[in-house]
Image: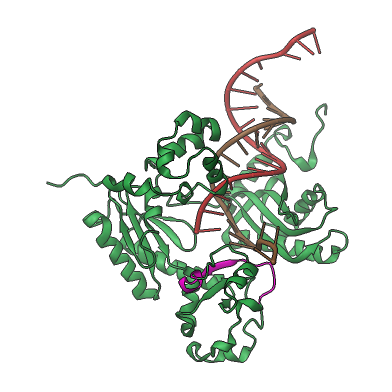
Chain colours: A green, B brown, C red
DNA sequence: TCTGGGGTCCTAGGACCC
DNA sequence: TCTGGGGTCCTAGGACCC
């Protein structure tokens, strides 16, 4: 007599992923506070190029940059658990982190390497369970419900097998939470970190959930957390017993109702196993704030380069988009965006640059700014985009509309 | 000591169309 | 002269996430 399978969703999160990948290559840094961050890998980062010829474990520790030697606008991408002891966390400004632990070892991010390891660990998971939702470079949801053995011990055995297989192949550890849904699995994967597994059964849900602060929930960020706080709602227990109508009044019908549901651990969202990109963008923060007129040449070259990189991304991945936009960030961290939708899809750097240039003209650039970005939206796979554009061309011109070639209402 | 880069989704107002 | 209603597209900004 077998009972029907219950829903068992796993969330797998790699432990201190970027830093762990770096430690594979620089084992002599193991056990020391290490942070990954700053700007992309640049020549001379380690001070002495000859060191690169040595096997990693023979590179002397003096060869590595220390956090206090960094000056600039970067943030910490990942900190090892040793560095976290000092209070350093991801997304923290580098200058602040340097105050907390000046002697931490600093390594530049190497995203290509992380992507390669990302592909590897995901391929291993797929070998055990095919239903996977990609949540970025270092985490995934996995549906255990219908996998043979996926229900045993609440999913523990399968989680253990996946965790071991990833370690055997890559030398990297991960943490896994298995629970009745994505919301709870995401929370549970944190509870035995690092290199842990947490199995959450349906009957334990409210006991584990309600003591947590609201902001632990994926989808409740700093703004919502603060607003809830001002309503006297701090923990999920408070949220669960808050007046549903009051939540809807404060946060709107969709989000307010969602808040109330998740406080009871309810989450029916399915895994999203295939996704096509919506937008592609490139942006850069300058070393110092720039001015449109005073730094015209530098900005112009930068702008062209951003357009070329977006175009190259689109071409490499086989997409084209109809909406081109720009983003500016001012020193006070406020930002302005402008976008124009054109009458055909493009993946061409010159077209992107031309339209993005039109967008830029519509922003007040009398002030200096710290960031410039270029984005292409409304993406379609190239072939579909071409078919759609060809069809649109055959339509009578009344059906066509372009912000660049506005027709007058009485024309 | 000011805060990277790449994304997704939602909202709200206005234009436009029938 | 005081004026609909629904649907879709476009734009700007914001919250949030990894």
- Which segment did they paint magenta? A70-85
- Above/below status of C15 relative to A120: above
Which residue shows up at 80% across the image and 34% down it?
A407
* Quadrant holding the C terminus of chain A: top right
Query: Looking at the image, is A223 positioned above or below residue A47?
Result: above
A366 or A397: nearer the eye?
A: A366
| Residue in front for this viewpoint, A384 or A289 | A289
Residue farthest along the front direction in this orientation = A232
Measuring from the top left, give residue A216's x and y in whole percent.
46, 51
When asked about the image quadrant of residue A15, the answer is bottom left
Was residue A78 drawn as part of the magenta stretch in this picture?
yes
Give yes or no for residue A222 being in the magenta stretch: no
Judge by depth and name the residue closer to the eye, A248 or A138: A248
Say whether residue A305 is left or right of residue A19: right
Task: Give the residue displayed 49% in from the left and 63% down from the top.
Answer: A137
- Point out residue A136 in the picture as x, y percentages from the top left corner: 49, 59
Q: Is residue A292 left or right of residue A172?
A: right
Residue A375 placement, left or right of A244? right
Horizontal relation, residue A22 to residue A396: left or right: left
């Amino acid at each position: 007599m077998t009972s029907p399978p219950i829903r068992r969703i796993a969330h797998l999160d790699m432990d201190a992923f970027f830093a762990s990948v770096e430690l594979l290559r620089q084992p002599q840094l193991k056990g020391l506070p290490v942070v990954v961050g700053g700007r992309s890998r640049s020549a001379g980062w380690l001070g002495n190029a000859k060191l690169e010829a040595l096997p990693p474990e023979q590179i002397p520790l003096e060869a590595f940059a220390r956090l206090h030697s960094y000056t600039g606008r970067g943030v910490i991408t990942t900190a090892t658990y040793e560095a976290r002891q000092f209070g350093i966390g991801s997304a923290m400004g580098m200058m602040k982190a340097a105050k907390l632990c000046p002697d931490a070892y600093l390594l530049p991010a190497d995203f290509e390497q992380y992507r390669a390891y990302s592909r590897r660990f995901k391929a291993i998971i797929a070998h055990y369970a095919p239903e996977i939702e990609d949540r970025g470079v270092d985490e995934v949801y996995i549906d255990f419900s219908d996998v043979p053995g996926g229900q045993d011990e609440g999913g523990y055995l399968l989680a253990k097998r996946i965790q071991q297989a990833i370690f055997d192949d890559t030398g990297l550890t991960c943490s896994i939470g298995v629970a009745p849904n994505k919301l709870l699995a995401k929370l549970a994967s944190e509870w035995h970190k690092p290199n842990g597994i947490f199995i959450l059964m349906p009957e334990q849900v409210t006991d584990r959930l309600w003591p947590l602060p609201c902001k632990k929930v994926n989808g409740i960020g700093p703004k919502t957390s603060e607003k809830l706080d001002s309503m006297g709602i701090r923990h999920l227990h408070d949220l669960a017993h808050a007046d549903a109508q009051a939540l809807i009044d404060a946060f709107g019908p969709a989000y307010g109702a969602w808040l109330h549901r998740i406080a009871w651990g309810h989450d029916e969202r399915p895994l999203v196993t295939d996704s096509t990109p919506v937008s592609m963008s490139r942006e850069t923060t300058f070393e110092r704030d720039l001015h449109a007129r005073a730094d015209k040449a530098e900005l112009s070259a930068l702008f062209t380069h951003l357009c070329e990189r977006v175009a190259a991304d689109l071409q490499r991945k086989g997409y084209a988009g109809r909406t081109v936009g720009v983003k500016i960030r001012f020193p006070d961290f406020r930002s302005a965006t402008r976008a124009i939708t054109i009458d055909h899809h493009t993946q061409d750097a010159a077209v992107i640059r031309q339209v993005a240039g039109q967008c830029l003209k519509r922003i007040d650039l009398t002030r200096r700014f710290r960031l410039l970005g270029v984005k292409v939206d409304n993406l379609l796979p190239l072939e579909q985009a071409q078919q759609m554009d060809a069809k649109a061309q055959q339509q009578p011109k009344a059906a066509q509309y372009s912000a660049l070639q506005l027709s007058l209402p009485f024309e």
